[in-house]
């Protein structure tokens, strides 16, 4: 699997970049992943946080399909591990 800046891929790196760039969002993501009972629940919580923030919810068009494709490439467990640090 190709790496991007030491991350699993571009989509994972970019998601971390945006989530960790703001102190409040970074703290929220840390809280989401450390307040769960299992890594699977932490992954689910982080994924839902990101996906629920989509401005394209309820739409159907090229941009929704592209966003969905990009979200499916994110290595959520890698993000959980980083925010758990």
Image (spheres, helix red, strand yellow):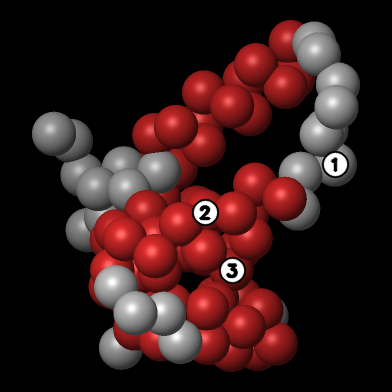
Crowding near the residue tagged with mark 3, few <14, some 14–19, many ≥20 C-alpha atoms within 10 Å:
some
Q: Where is residue 37 in the image (x, y as percent from the top left)?
A: 34, 79
Crowding near the residue tagged with mark 1, few <14, some 14–19, many ≥20 C-alpha atoms within 10 Å:
few
**Label 1 near label 3: C-beta < 8 Å?**
no
Q: Where is residue 52 in the image (x, y as percent from the top left)?
A: 72, 50
Q: Circle 1 is placed at which residue position?
A: 55
| Residue drawn at x 63%, y 29% as measured from the top left | 67
Image height of 6 relative to 26, above or below: above
**Viewer-nearest of discs 3 and 1:** 1
Image height of 69 relative to 77, above or below: above
Q: Distance between the residues labelled 3 and 2?
A: 12 Å
**Viewer-nearest of discs 3 and 2:** 2
Image height of 63 relative to 40, above or below: above
3 with respect to 48 (left or right): left
- Residue sitting farthest toward the left: 1
Q: In which quarter of the image is residue 21?
A: bottom right
| Residue drawn at x 46%, y 87% as measured from the top left | 35
**Residue 47 tag number:** 2
Q: Is residue 14 visible?
A: yes
Q: How far apart are marks 1 and 2 (CA)?
A: 15 Å
Q: Can residue 79 be seen in this view?
A: no
Label 2: state its secondary structure: helix
Q: How far apart are marks 3 and 1 (CA)?
A: 16 Å
21 with respect to 37 (left or right): right
Q: Where is residue 14 in the image (x, y as percent from the top left)?
A: 50, 52
> Which image quarter holds the N terminus?
top left
Q: Circle 3 is placed at which residue position?
A: 19
| Residue drawn at x 72%, y 22% as measured from the top left | 64
**Viewer-nearest of discs 1 and 2:** 2
């Amino acid at each position: 699997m190709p790496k991007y800046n030491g991350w699993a891929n571009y989509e994972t790196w970019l998601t971390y970049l945006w989530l960790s760039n703001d102190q409040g969002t970074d703290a929220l993501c840390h809280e989401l992943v450390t307040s769960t009972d299992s890594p699977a629940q932490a992954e689910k919580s982080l994924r839902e946080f990101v996906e629920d923030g989509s401005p394209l919810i309820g739409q159907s068009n090229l941009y929704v399909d592209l966003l969905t494709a990009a979200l499916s490439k994110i290595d959520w467990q890698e993000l959980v591990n980083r925010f758990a640090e």
